[in-house]
């Protein structure tokens, strides 16, 4: 069985605390036409290098009914700056246009099969996975990117087109799993393409 959620799979449910102090589940986004769930964190240079590009994409497609939901599954015991308090401070500072959720148990990362930060999952109106992988081809220095897969997918999805490339490999730091070396990945985790 694949580690990462496969194309056509239904979005796994979750109940996680956001930086606004509220609990959110998948059903809280049922009124949104499309959903982008992405795994991120506070410290990763690939996240820091591409957050503003992700913001631009989120703002661009919000008019088409696309909702972005960010999840931090990293263990704060690996990187202290990935803890909930730092998440709250980061959202207060940057006011990103997404809900930022804390996956303390890492169960949601396991359900989705998150590999890296950032790692994007795009769901259609039926909450079936139509794309998973990277946002851009050079997230560490997004200004030097030549490909924005997330923008392409959302353009295709919101205009009723077939997703031309549904799978790419996410580019970034691996998820920081509790109790493991900071570079450890589950044995069954592998490249998507």
Image (tube, rainbow, N blue to C red):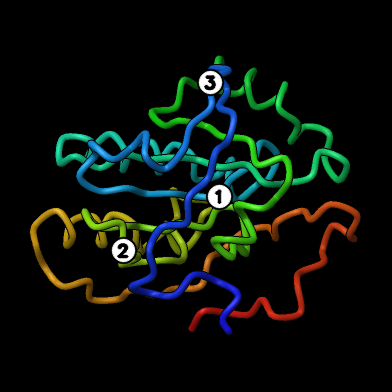
Q: Residue at x 46, y 20 (%)?
A: 95
Q: Earlier in the sequence, mark 3 or mark 2?
A: 3
Residue ID for mark 1: 39
Indicate whether 88 appears above or below 191: above
Q: Residues within 10 Å of mark 3 (few under 14, many from 20)?
A: few
Residue ID for mark 3: 22
Residue ID for mark 2: 128
Label 1 to label 3: alpha-carbon separation:
19 Å
Describe residue 3's horizontal placement relative to residue 130 as left or right: right
Proximity of marks 1 and 3: CB atoms separated by less than 8 Å: no
Q: Residues within 10 Å of mark 1 (few under 14, many from 20)?
A: many
Residue 78 is situated, as x and y percent measured from the top left of the image, at 86, 45
Label 3 to label 2: alpha-carbon separation:
26 Å
Q: Earlier in the sequence, mark 2 or mark 1?
A: 1
In the figure, residue 164 lies in which quadrant?
bottom left
Residue 133 is situated, as x and y percent measured from the top left of the image, at 46, 66
Residue 30 is situated, as x and y percent measured from the top left of the image, at 28, 40
Proximity of marks 3 and 2: CB atoms separated by less than 8 Å: no
In the figure, residue 98 lies in which quadrant?
top left
Q: Residue at x 91, y 54 (%)?
A: 179
Residue 77 is situated, as x and y percent measured from the top left of the image, at 88, 41
Q: Residue at x 79, y 56 (%)?
A: 177
């Amino acid at each position: 069985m694949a580690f990462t959620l496969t194309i056509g799979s239904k979005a796994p449910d979750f109940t996680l605390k956001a930086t606004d102090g509220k609990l959110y589940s998948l059903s809280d986004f049922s009124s949104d036409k499309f959903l982008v769930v992405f795994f991120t964190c506070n410290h990763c240079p690939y996240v820091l290098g591409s957050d503003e590009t992700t913001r631009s994409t989120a703002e661009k497609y919000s008019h088409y009914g696309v909702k972005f939901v960010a999840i931090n599954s990293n263990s704060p015991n690996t990187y202290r700056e990935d803890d909930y308090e730092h998440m709250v401070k980061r959202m207060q500072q940057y006011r990103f246009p997404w809900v930022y959720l804390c996956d303390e148990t890492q169960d949601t990362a396991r359900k989705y099969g998150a590999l890296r930060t950032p790692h994007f999952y795009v769901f259609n109106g039926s909450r079936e996975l139509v794309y998973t992988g990277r946002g851009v081809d050079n997230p560490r220095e997004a200004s030097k990117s030549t490909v924005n897969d997330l923008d392409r997918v959302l353009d295709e999805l919101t205009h009723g087109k077939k997703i031309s490339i549904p799978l790419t490999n996410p580019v970034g730091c691996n998820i920081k799993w509790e109790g493991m070396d900071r570079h450890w990945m589950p044995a069954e985790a592998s490249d998507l393409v």
